[in-house]
Image (spheres, rainbow, N blue to C red):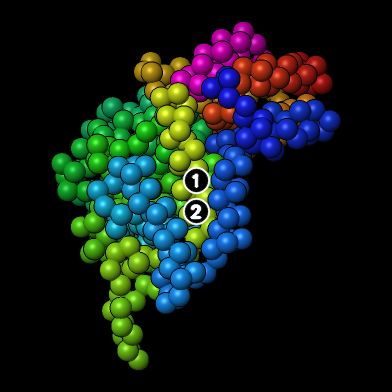
């Protein structure tokens, strides 16, 4: 990765922030976009823009082709069985809400259980609270081992004969730890439950095979893997998508509409109501191609190298507290969550920003996990393929500046 000219491919990385060259370490929130992706978006709007699936004219046929090509690519990208199992959404949040509304509400009943983990992002948590409340079901949590991995005991005991849904994040956006989704899915299936996987922090960073994982549903956002904002993916097993009612209703998702009733289109159109984000799909297609040109083993290796470089240096700093960095397993992605002792994370982020270093500070949309960790907020540095050891040096130098400014 070191030899590739990412500064050229991602012009935004040449920008200065507060007079300093930008070090972008907030990839868990969103990633920067390479020229090829920006170009794909421009090419679509500049040369192919039309409403897909509707027009009987050539331009609309071309727009449909671009959209469906992206779907077929997304299918290959996560090894889904068929393109019909790929539903485009606006982001992971909408994909997970689709599952909660169209699977949770119809198929969870009073006295049933929904099991999630305490590491869930609010997007895979708040929708399940809604289902549990509306259906008088209980919402149960899998908690953590001391090293941040999912509790073995909870995985065995919390999923029971009454469990209908198990929702688990593949990678925690706070701890960066890869959960053993296959194991969770096997346990869910052994009691007849479905396994809903939030792949927002895994799909951008590792090769994903939804069938090997045993995921019944798998959601991710394009913008966290180099794509434009406004395009997301939901994979659902065909047999489940077939029996689910639509999520949103309107144009494009129907077969026939009478005055009082309607029948619905085949998959995946049944779940894609209204005009879709064809430009976003074109960008997603280009982004997946870009990532595949590097291979995920190289992308993961780069993140591993950055972790190996950063963690010993951070551990030497007595004013830094780390979270999720003690896993006994080799299962960490490029996310380092930390606090500077006695300094509010927002102050840390502001001082780092003055040095040109962009990190995330706050609860990371994971308030139950924050409470579980005994913190109101933390700082998070998250890496991607264009980050380098020089970025780590700049970040750590900026942390020394925090100590100086705050007189620690
Ligand atoms: C683990 C996880 N799930 C879901 C989301 C929600 O993604 P989006 O805001 O793109 O819907 C995020 C975003 O930070 C995330 O990290």
Where does the C terminus fall, quadrant-wise? Answer: top right
- Count the marks: how many? 2
What residue would you read off at disc 2? 282
Magenta stretch bounds? 301-320
At x 42% / y 29%, what residue is drawn? 295
The answer for how far apart the CA atoms under marks 1 and 2 are is 6 Å
Which disc, if any, is residue 286?
Answer: 1
Which disc, if any, is residue 183?
Answer: none
> Element type at marker 2?
helix
At x 60% / y 48%, what residue is drawn? 38
Q: Nearer the viewer, residue 169 or 51?
A: 51
From where the camera sits, is residue 404 visible?
Answer: yes
At x 84% / y 30%, what residue is drawn? 19
Residue 21 is situated, as x and y percent measured from the top left of the image, at 76, 28
- Left or right of 349, for residue 323: left
- Left or right of 119, for residue 374: right
Q: Can you tell which quarter of the image residue 388 is in? A: top right
- Left or right of 109, for residue 235: right
15 drawn magenta: no
Q: Can you tell which quarter of the image residue 135 is in? A: bottom left
Residue 61 is situated, as x and y percent measured from the top left of the image, at 43, 68
Question: Image height check: is 186 above or below 395?
Answer: below
Most common secondary structure along the magenta stretch: helix
Where does the N terminus fall, quadrant-wise? Answer: top right
Question: Image height check: is 136 above or below 161?
Answer: below
> Furthest-front residue in view?
58
Residue 240 is situated, as x and y percent measured from the top left of the image, at 23, 57
Is mark 1 in CB contact (under 8 Å) with mark 2? yes
Badge 2 residue CB within 8 Å of ligand 1: no
């Amino acid at each position: 990765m070191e030899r590739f000219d990412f500064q050229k491919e991602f012009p935004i990385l040449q920008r200065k922030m507060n007079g300093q060259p930008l070090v972008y370490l907030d990839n868990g929130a969103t990633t920067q976009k390479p020229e090829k992706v920006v170009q794909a978006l421009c090419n679509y709007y500049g040369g192919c823009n039309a409403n897909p699936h509707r027009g009987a004219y050539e331009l609309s046929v071309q727009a449909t082709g671009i959209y469906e090509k992206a779907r077929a690519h997304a299918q290959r990208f996560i090894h889904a069985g068929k393109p019909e199992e790929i539903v485009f959404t606006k982001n992971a949040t909408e994909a997970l809400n689709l599952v909660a509304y169209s699977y949770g509400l119809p198929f969870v009943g009073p006295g049933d259980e929904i099991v999630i983990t305490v590491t869930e992002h609010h997007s895979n948590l708040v929708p399940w609270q809604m289902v549990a409340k509306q259906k008088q079901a209980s919402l149960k949590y899998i908690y953590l081992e001391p090293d941040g991995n999912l509790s073995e005991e909870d995985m065995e005991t919390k999923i029971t004969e009454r469990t209908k849904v198990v929702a688990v994040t593949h990678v925690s956006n706070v701890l960066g730890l890869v959960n053993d989704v296959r194991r969770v899915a096997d346990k869910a299936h052994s009691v007849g439950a479905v396994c809903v996987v939030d792949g927002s922090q895994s799909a951008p960073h590792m090769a994903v095979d939804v069938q090997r994982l045993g995921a019944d549903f798998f959601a991710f956002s394009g913008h966290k893997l180099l794509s434009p904002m406004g395009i997301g993916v939901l994979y659902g097993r065909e047999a489940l998508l077939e029996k689910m009612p639509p999520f949103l209703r309107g144009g494009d998702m129907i077969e026939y509409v009478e005055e009082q009733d309607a029948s619905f289109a085949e998959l995946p159109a049944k779940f894609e109501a209204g005009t879709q984000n064809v430009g976003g799909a074109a960008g997603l297609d280009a982004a997946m191609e870009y990532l595949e040109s590097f291979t995920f083993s190289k992308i993961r290796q780069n993140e591993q190298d950055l972790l190996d470089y950063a963690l010993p240096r951070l551990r030497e700093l007595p004013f830094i507290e780390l979270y999720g960095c003690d896993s006994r397993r080799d299962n960490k992605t490029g996310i380092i969550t930390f606090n500077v002792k006695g300094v509010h994370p927002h102050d840390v982020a502001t001082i780092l920003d003055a040095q040109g270093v962009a990190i995330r500070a706050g609860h990371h949309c994971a308030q139950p996990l924050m409470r579980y960790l005994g913190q109101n907020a933390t700082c998070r540095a998250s890496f991607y393929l264009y980050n380098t050891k020089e970025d780590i040096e700049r970040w750590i130098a900026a942390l020394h500046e925090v100590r100086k400014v705050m007189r620690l």
